[in-house]
Amino acid sequence: MDRKIVIIPTYNEKENIEAIIRKVFSLDGDYSILVIEDGSPDGTAAIVKKLQDEFSERLFMIERKGKLGLGTAYITGFKWCIEHGYDYIFEMDADFSHDPDDLPRLYSACAEGGADAAIGSRYSDGVSVVNWPIGRILMSYFASVYVRTVLSVKLYDTTAGFMCYSRKVLETMDLDDVRMKGYGFQIEMKYTACRLGFKVAEVPVIFVNRKLGTSKMSSSIFGEAFWGVIKLRTRKFHRRG
C-alpha cells in the first residue's frame, strides 16, 4: 500500500487543529499527518502533542521558532517526508477550507489517473468558492488568469494550496532553489513541476472560507507573487542530481 502523508502548516489554529486531525484520521486509506508548527502563541502545539499520545505512529510535528513563511514550512515538510519514505505528500490548510474528504480524490488522480501531481482546483469547473467576499474571489481568480497568461501554463488554479505530489516530483525538484516564500510559493511549485515535464491534473473541489480563526493572507504576499511570476519567466529549471 502507498504511504500517504498530509502536511498541515499551523500558526494560531487552536480552534481547528484537533478537529482537522481527527477528520483526516477517520478517512479510509491510512493517512499520516505532519504538522509544521510556527511557534503559535495560542497553544496549537500543545494540542498536537496531546494528540500524539493517541496517534503516536501517524501524527508527527516539527516545531519552528516563529512565522517563517508558508513556502519554507512546506519545503521543510517535503524534505522530512522524502527522508521518511512517503509515496504521496499532500498540502492542506488546517481551517477546513480544504475538505479532507477530497484527499482520496487527489490521491486517485495520481495513483490511478496517471498524474504526477494533483491540484484541488477551485476554478477548473467554474468558480467553486463559498463565503469569500467578492473582492477576494476576483483577486484570486484573476491572479490565476495572470499566471496562466504570463507563464503559458494550462492550469486554472495556479495559486491553490490543496495539493497532492508524488514522491518522484519532489525528489526531482531542487527544493532548495524554490525562492518564493508566501502566496507565490504555490505558483512556483506548480510551474516548476510543469517545466520539468510532470503531468499536473486538476480535480474540482469546493473551497469554503474558514469559520474559525483568522486568515494569514496579506497584501505583501500578493506583491511577492506578482513580481515573482515575472521573474519565473526567465528562470532555468534543473532536475536534481
Image (cartoon, rainbow, N blue to C red):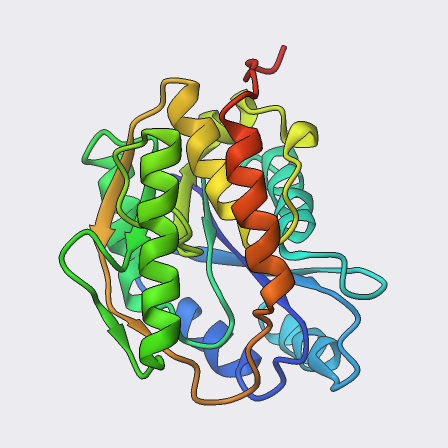
**Percent x, y for residue 216?**
60, 72
**Percent x, y for residue 222?**
55, 58
Quadrant holding the N terminus: top left
Q: Nearer the viewer, residue 132 or 233?
A: 233
The reply to whether residue 29 is in sight is no
**Percent x, y for residue 167?**
47, 31
**Which residue is the extreme one toward the top?**
241
Q: Taking 114 as reference, is 75 above or below it?
A: below
Q: Residue at x 23, y 41 (%)?
A: 109
Name the side, left or right, on which 166 lies relative to 148: right
Q: Residue at x 40, y 56 (%)?
A: 162
Q: Taking 212 as reference, is 28 above or below it?
A: above
Quadrant holding the C terminus: top right
The reply to whether residue 113 is in sight is yes
**Which residue is the extreme one toward the left?**
125
Name the side, left or right, on which 92 lies relative to 55: left
The number of callouts visible is 0
Q: Residue at x 25, y 34 (%)?
A: 154
Q: Taking 150 as reference, is 103 above or below it?
A: below
Q: Nearer the viewer, residue 163 or 27?
A: 163
Q: Quadrant of residue 179?
A: top right
**Which residue is the extreme one toward the right?**
65
Q: Nearer the viewer, residue 64 or 33?
A: 64
**Percent x, y for residue 58?**
55, 59
Q: Taking 18 as reference, is 75 above or below it?
A: above
Q: Residue at x 44, y 56 (%)?
A: 161
